[in-house]
Image (spheres, rainbow, N blue to C red):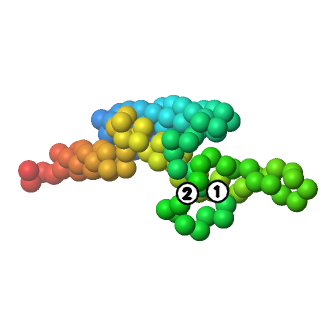
Amino acid sequence: MLQFINKIKSDPFIPEIIRREIVEHLESRAKAINEIHIKNFSFYLEELYFGKLDKYEIATSPVQDLNGLKYCKILKNSFGNNLERDSEAIAYNSTLLHNLINLDLYEKGFGISQVEKDVHHLRLLIQEYFESFNPLK
């Protein structure tokens, strides 16, 4: 996203008023996304490490019945009593992390519907800019 922001900042064909709005939105969004990801990954890993994710329904493999989920087991016994990663459970549990991130994004004003609303505002700004050159208005 930062490369995209830099391209917009230096694009001579984007009018200043539009460029400023777009860059401000994207920089705020990038900062929020970065902070939220760090916060939630840290939380998830710490809670997982200490086995404190029992307040969340966590899947264990094989995931057959989503209604009967068990708690926080991403390691399973393999042959010879060695522990190995339970990739199916990890894949399912990623939805927990995804949901935590989405909740925080909405709280910061960057949920999906909120971003769509902001994009609509930016499109209207662009439309108004071009209409200002219409000699018939």
In the rendered image, the vertical position of residue 50 relative to residue 71, given as above or below = above
Circle 1: element type:
loop
Q: For the residue marked with disc 2, what is the amino acid?
A: Leu
Q: CA distance from mark 1 to mark 2?
A: 7 Å
Residue 79 or 17: which is nearer the viewer? 79
In the picture of the structure, the residue carrying the numbered disc 2 is: 69
**Quarter of the image where one finds residue 78:** bottom right
Residue 116 or 54: which is nearer the viewer? 54
**Residue at 65% of width from left, 53% of height from top?**
90
Left or right, 69 with respect to 132, comes to: right
**Residue at 66% of width from left, 33% of height from top?**
50
Circle 2: element type:
loop
Residue sitting at the far right: 80
**Quarter of the image where one finds residue 118:** top left
Dot 2: within a 10 Å radius of its alpha carbon, few (fewer than 14), some, or many (20 or more) residues? some
**Residue at 76% of width from left, 54% of height from top?**
76
Left or right, 30 with respect to 124, comes to: right
Q: Are marks 1 and 2 in contact (CB under 8 Å)?
A: yes
Nearer-N-terminus badge (1/2): 1
Left or right, 109 with respect to 37, comes to: left
Residue 2, given in percent of the width and then of the height, sits at 53, 38
In the picture of the structure, the residue carrying the numbered disc 1 is: 60
In the rendered image, the vertical position of residue 69 relative to residue 37, given as above or below = below
Residue 116, given in percent of the width and then of the height, sits at 32, 50
Q: For the residue marked with disc 1, what is the amino acid?
A: Thr
